Image (cartoon, grey):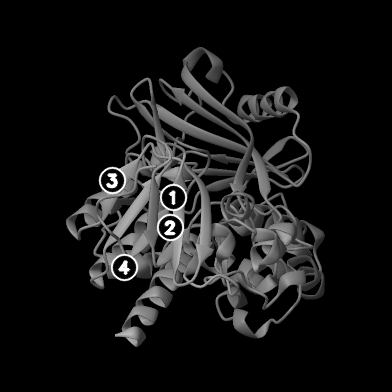
Amino acid sequence: MKSFEKTYDVAVIGGGLSGLTASIYLAKAGLTVILVEKMNQLGGRAMTVKKKGASLNLGVHAFYLDGEGEAVMKELGVELKGNHPPASAIAVWNNKIYPMPAGPLKLISSKLFSVPGKLELARFMMKLGRIDTKSIGQVSLREWAEQEIREPMIRNVVYSICRSNSLVPHPELQPAGSAIRQLQRTFSGKAFYLDNGWAALVNDLEEKARSVGVTVLTGHLISEITHGGTSLQLRFKNDEVLEVSSVIVTGSPKETCKLVKDADQTQLARWESQARPMKAACLDLVLRRLPKPNPFIIAGFWLDQPIFYNNPTSVSKMSEDGSVVIHLIKHLGENPSHPKEDERQLEQAMDLLQPGWRSEELGRQFLPNMTVVHDFCSVDKYGSFSGPSVPEIRGLYVAGDWAGHGELLVDAALASAKRAAQSIISQYASRQ
């Protein structure tokens, strides 16, 4: 049995956004850090695949500014390169396309809403930015919407946008506070699309991690984490053993439970049993061009189906030759997957918006039954957050999109990484 020649204070397991972020905070605080990734490349769900010269993310990705994620990037000195999408979207109802009202004039001419509905939507849009989301309390998005919005079509619009910007298609489970906050950010133009896919952000974080002294180890699989006394032991598949004082695991609750010995006797087991992984079927297309004019329509919201259309190339660079990248997603939630049917539905959605697209197709990536978020803070877990520490195991911490304390998606991944790192930094400071 071999052991590592060099010693480390902290091991971070997982080389996605959470792992890279946590490792940078730790190393900047003066701790010796090793980051271990089982794949041969970093990124996790933020990886980008190259097809026909285009950059394809693993499904729909957007970085929402003015939140915890952007604050972390600024603290780490990582610049976000990309652009904001225009307020130009369409809604689909009963297989018919309607422009999504983005201002008073479009609202007046919209055929999607009744006259009373237009008046109510105008009032709702005016008050949306003033809603204090922290005071909403333990109420679901559905409960809140049914109390605050009388017009059913407006509720459909709200539900559709909220499932698209959170990847949670269950308004009866999603807390109204976090959903409305994300809605505020959407309507105030805080959505941001990264140039060259999310791998560009991963590369910047990796460069930053290495520059502050993080040891990055890819292609190494850990088989078990054992604990006892004042240290934790990481046992690798190749029989190597690494002993450290602290570990941050950034995998899913299920993966973390499999790694940690006697996890069933800790909070990890409860977090894993309560987790609600959200699934989706994602179809990413590379097209020579868009057959239908007006490529600046960046988003399409289906109001009667859990489908979303996204054209990031209208504002961000996703290819070298000007080809178009289209993302379509069918939100499955906790429902079973039917890959062939899901792909067919997404192709039909594309037929509606861009008839003739098939003759322009250069390449595609279909990801059926993909986990788009490992868990979220549902209303039945209100105020009961996961992590960052595992109370029963000294020195063990968790981070990831499922370990948010009210944040969503990348905000949760980055904020949880910062929390875990700062907890370890505080422990080291108190010992010294």
In the picture, the disc for residue 25 is 4
Callout 1 secondary element: loop
Query: Residue at label 1?
Result: 14
| CB-based contact (under 8 Å), mark 2 and mark 1 | yes
The residue closer to the viewer here, 43 or 128, is 43
Cα distance between the residues tagged 1 and 3: 15 Å
The residue closer to the viewer here, 376 or 387, is 387
Are there few (<14), some (14-19), or many (20+) residues within 10 Å of tag 2?
Answer: many
Are there few (<14), some (14-19), or many (20+) residues within 10 Å of tag 4?
Answer: many
Camera-near label (2 vs 3) is 2
Query: Residue at label 2?
Result: 18
Residue 177 in the figure: left or right of residue 149: left
Camera-near label (2 vs 1) is 1
Camera-near label (1 vs 3) is 1
Q: Is residue 201 above or below residue 105?
A: above
Query: Which residue type does callout 2 highlight?
Result: Ser
Are there few (<14), some (14-19), or many (20+) residues within 10 Å of tag 1?
Answer: many
Query: Residue at label 3?
Result: 203
Residue in the image at 26% along x and 52% along y: 215
Cα distance between the residues tagged 1 and 4: 15 Å
Residue 101 in the figure: left or right of residue 240: right
Position in image of residue 328 (x %, y %): 58, 35
First reached walking from the N terminus: tag 1 or tag 4: 1
Residue in the image at 62% along x and 43% along y: 371
Position in image of residue 204 (x %, y %): 26, 50
Callout 2 secondary element: helix
